[in-house]
Image (cartoon, rainbow, N blue to C red):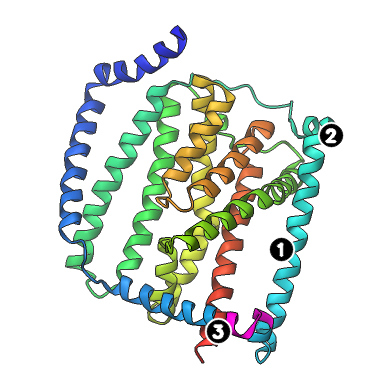
């Protein structure tokens, strides 16, 4: 208990010692408090984004009613053979992946040799003296940089590019802020005398393909749990007539389909490739490793996964994302390289992006 108290006390002592970071923290609190008040004063305004999303939801509800009236999605798509074939193919793959995931979990639970085979023993010796103050430094620097970046991007758009879609600048801000976050992590680790390799940014010699396979297998293993929780939450939401908020990228996809198609391609690249890499460096390589050093493996997994779910700002999807984070943290703990977790993350994002576009085609077909 004394050890735990000492570690929590070190959080407060950090703000006492690091006067510059304390000043940055207070400045950010004031800035975001002001922005929150401004945002609250504009609540209720019907923006272009809300109009597009409302139209899509109405179309989606109409298609759902048509499917229920007809009896099945196969009958609904019988006059659209290509979409029907795609649906049957996806259903076959989803059923196979779900079944294979159950089999993998069965062997992981009841076959100790499988669990032991996941552990990689030949790993580089870490040199980073992990301290909780490193987390606060990176977090404060990242939030501050994001705020400044948002200000300059807003000015650039208003002065030089008022006709460019706002979604372009939102994606630009997301990309640059993620890059800044990773740069701050590297800076803080080097400042502490560590090495970027301690973030899991290495691959066992000659075993890259094995790590990729482990990442894919990890996704299959977590898929049954993830989907079961998601289906349960959807059922509960239906009972209370709750409409979960859409992912921000969904709005981008809907708004820019005809106006700026290149933004859709970049959005897919950002969400499917870049974001998983950046997020795994931050949440697993940095946060999990640091939290584990402070509070142990289990709390490290729980805290880093909870932070991972919280930062997605979707209350409905918190638990599915949390489970996904736990799975990636477990893989990183076993392999000590980020490659399997990145493969898992990329696979998940690309699959759900693909699912959205298929669902969108079904909705469009229902409105023809």
Q: Name the residue under label 1.
A: 94
Q: Which of 170 and 59 is in front in this view?
A: 59
Q: Is residue 68 magenta?
A: yes
| Mark 2 / mark 3, whichever is N-terminal | 3
Picture coordinates of residue 295, whole percent (x, y): 51, 21
Q: Sort mark 3 into few (<14), some (14-19) or many (20+) by Cα contacts within 10 Å.
A: some
Q: Mark 3 points at which residue?
A: 66
| Mark 1 secondary-structure assignment | helix
Q: Sort mark 1 into few (<14), some (14-19) or many (20+) by Cα contacts within 10 Å.
A: few
Picture coordinates of residue 75, whole percent (x, y): 68, 85
Picture coordinates of residue 222, whole percent (x, y): 67, 47
| Mark 1 / mark 3, whichever is N-terminal | 3
Picture coordinates of residue 324, whole percent (x, y): 58, 46
Indicate whether 361 appears above or below 32: below
Indicate whether 346 appears above or below 55: above
Q: Residue at the spot x=53%, y=55% of the render?
A: 233
The residue at the far front in this view is: 239
Q: Does the magenta stretch include residue 303?
A: no
| Mark 3 secondary-structure assignment | helix
The residue segment tinted magenta is 66-74
3D distance between C-alphas at marks 1 and 3: 24 Å
Q: Answer left or right for 197 relative to 294.
A: right
Q: Mark 2 points at which residue?
A: 111
Q: Answer left or right for 50 relative to 317.
A: left
Q: Magenta-highlighted stretch: main secondary structure? A: helix
Single out the mark in the foreground, 1 or 3.
Answer: 3
3D distance between C-alphas at marks 1 and 2: 25 Å
Q: Which of 15 and 90 is in front in this view?
A: 90
């Amino acid at each position: 208990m004394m050890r735990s108290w000492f570690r929590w006390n070190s959080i407060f002592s950090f703000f006492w010692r690091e006067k510059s970071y304390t000043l940055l923290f207070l400045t950010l609190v004031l800035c975001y408090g002001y922005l929150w008040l401004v945002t609250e004063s504009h609540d209720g305004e019907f923006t272009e984004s809300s109009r597009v999303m409302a139209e899509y939801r109405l179309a989606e509800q109409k298609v759902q009613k048509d499917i229920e009236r007809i009896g099945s999605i196969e009958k609904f798509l019988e006059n659209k053979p290509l979409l029907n074939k795609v649906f049957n193919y996806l259903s076959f793959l989803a059923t196979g992946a779900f079944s294979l995931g159950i089999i993998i979990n069965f062997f992981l639970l009841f076959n100790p040799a499988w669990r032991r085979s996941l552990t990689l023993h030949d790993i580089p010796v870490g040199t980073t003296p992990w301290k909780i103050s490193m987390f606060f430094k990176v977090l404060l620097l990242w939030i501050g940089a994001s705020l400044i970046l948002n200000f300059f991007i807003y000015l650039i758009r208003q002065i030089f590019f008022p006709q460019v879609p706002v979604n372009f600048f939102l994606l630009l801000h997301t990309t640059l802020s993620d890059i800044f976050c990773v740069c701050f992590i590297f800076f803080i680790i080097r400042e502490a005398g560590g090495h970027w390799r301690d973030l899991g940014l290495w691959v066992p010699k000659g075993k890259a393909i094995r790590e990729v396979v482990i990442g894919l297998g990890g996704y299959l293993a977590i898929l049954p749990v993830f989907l079961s929780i998601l289906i349960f939450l959807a059922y509960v939401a239906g009972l209370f007539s709750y409409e979960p908020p859409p992912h921000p990228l969904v709005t981008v996809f809907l708004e820019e389909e005809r106006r700026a198609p290149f933004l859709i391609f970049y959005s897919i690249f950002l969400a499917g490739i870049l974001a998983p890499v950046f997020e795994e460096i931050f949440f697993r390589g940095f946060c999990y490793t640091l939290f584990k050093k402070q509070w142990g493996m289990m709390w490290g997994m729980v805290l880093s996964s909870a932070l991972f779910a919280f930062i997605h700002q979707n209350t409905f999807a918190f638990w599915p994302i949390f489970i996904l984070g736990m799975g990636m943290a477990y893989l990183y703990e076993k392999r000590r390289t980020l490659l399997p977790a990145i493969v898992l993350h990329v696979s998940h994002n690309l699959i759900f992006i693909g699912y959205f576009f298929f669902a969108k085609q079904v909705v469009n077909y229902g409105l023809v």
